[in-house]
């Protein structure tokens, strides 16, 4: 899983260890900010958890590149990002008031976490290339994981689009769903571009994707969270009425 020196020296320095730890700090600060706002709004902590899990992945990558137990921290990092698509779907489901696919997503995410933590040789550690981290996952599990991950990311976009089309009365929830789609595209589109233009990065998709996801973190904190909290607050008022 080692990269050649020429690949290491020419590819995506924007995901180097200093950027990893800076991204971790930014995402933790954003999580604290959203936590304070969510407590004031008496809203749930779904967005906070999403930001915290993004931050944990960045910290795991930084520690792997720092020579800390790559097997342990690769499992911690994968544990964190495995729940991200499901948390995204949870946020969309709350806005749509439609949770018919959420339980299935949670079941699949937990199944992968159990594999990563308890099944020997499912994941054999990780390699720091100097620019990003390459996770050594058993090939068949890696393929299934990819289908799960990108399948649920696309499902989140589809559910958000359907929520915008169907419920024309709730402008607040439509606004949050719109920004949710923009947030997902903010890291999916750059990842797709890098995937085709820089083929060597294909072995480090998780690392590259979560590097771009810092854009999504800002969108979550400053565009989605304020509207989301207001929607949840109104929902609570309606239930009490």
Image: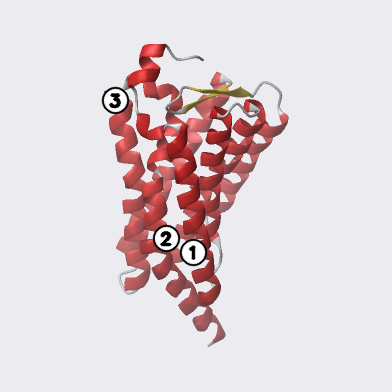
Marks 2,3: beta carbons within 8 A: no
Secondary structure beneath label 2: helix
Foreground mark, 2 or 3, reads: 2
Query: Could you tell which of marks 2 and 3 lies nearer the N-terminus?
Result: 3
Whether residue 101 appears in this view of the structure is no
Nearer to me, 202 or 108:
202
Marks 1,2: beta carbons within 8 A: yes
* x, y percent for residue 145: 53, 32
Residue at position x 55%, y 72% from top?
A: 39
Q: Which residue is mark 2?
A: 221
What is the spatial separation of the Cα atoms under label 2 and label 3, in whole angstroms?
A: 30 Å
Q: Which residue is mark 3?
A: 196
Query: Could you tell which of marks 1 and 2 lies nearer the N-terminus?
Result: 1
Residue at position x 62%, y 27% from top?
A: 70
Secondary structure beneath label 1: helix
Q: Residues within 10 Å of mark 3 (few under 14, many from 20)?
A: few
Q: Which residue is mark 1?
A: 34
């Amino acid at each position: 899983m080692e990269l050649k020196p020429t690949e290491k020296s020419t590819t995506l320095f924007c995901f180097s260890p200093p950027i990893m730890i800076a991204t971790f700090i930014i995402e933790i600060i954003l999580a604290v900010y959203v936590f304070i706002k969510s407590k004031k709004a008496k809203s749930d902590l779904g967005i906070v958890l999403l930001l915290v899990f993004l931050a944990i992945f960045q910290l795991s990558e930084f520690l792997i590149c720092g020579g800390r137990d790559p097997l342990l921290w690769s499992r911690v990092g994968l544990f964190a990002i495995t729940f991200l698509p499901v948390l995204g779907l949870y946020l969309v489901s709350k806005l749509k008031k439609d949770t018919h696919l959420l339980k299935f997503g949670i079941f699949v995410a937990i199944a992968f976490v159990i594999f990563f933590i308890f099944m020997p040789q499912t994941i054999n550690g990780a390699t720091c290339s100097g620019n990003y981290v390459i996770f050594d996952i058993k090939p068949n599990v890696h393929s299934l994981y990819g289908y799960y991950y990108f399948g649920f990311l696309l499902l989140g976009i589809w559910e958000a689009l359907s929520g915008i089309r169907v419920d024309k009365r709730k402008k607040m929830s439509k606004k949050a769903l719109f920004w949710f789609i923009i947030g997902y595209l903010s890291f999916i589109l750059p990842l797709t571009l890098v995937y085709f233009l820089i083929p060597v990065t294909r072995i480090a998709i998780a690392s590259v994707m979560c590097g771009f996801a810092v854009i999504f973190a800002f969108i979550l904190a400053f565009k989605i969270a304020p509207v989301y909290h207001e929607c949840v607050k109104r929902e609570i008022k309606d239930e009490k009425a």
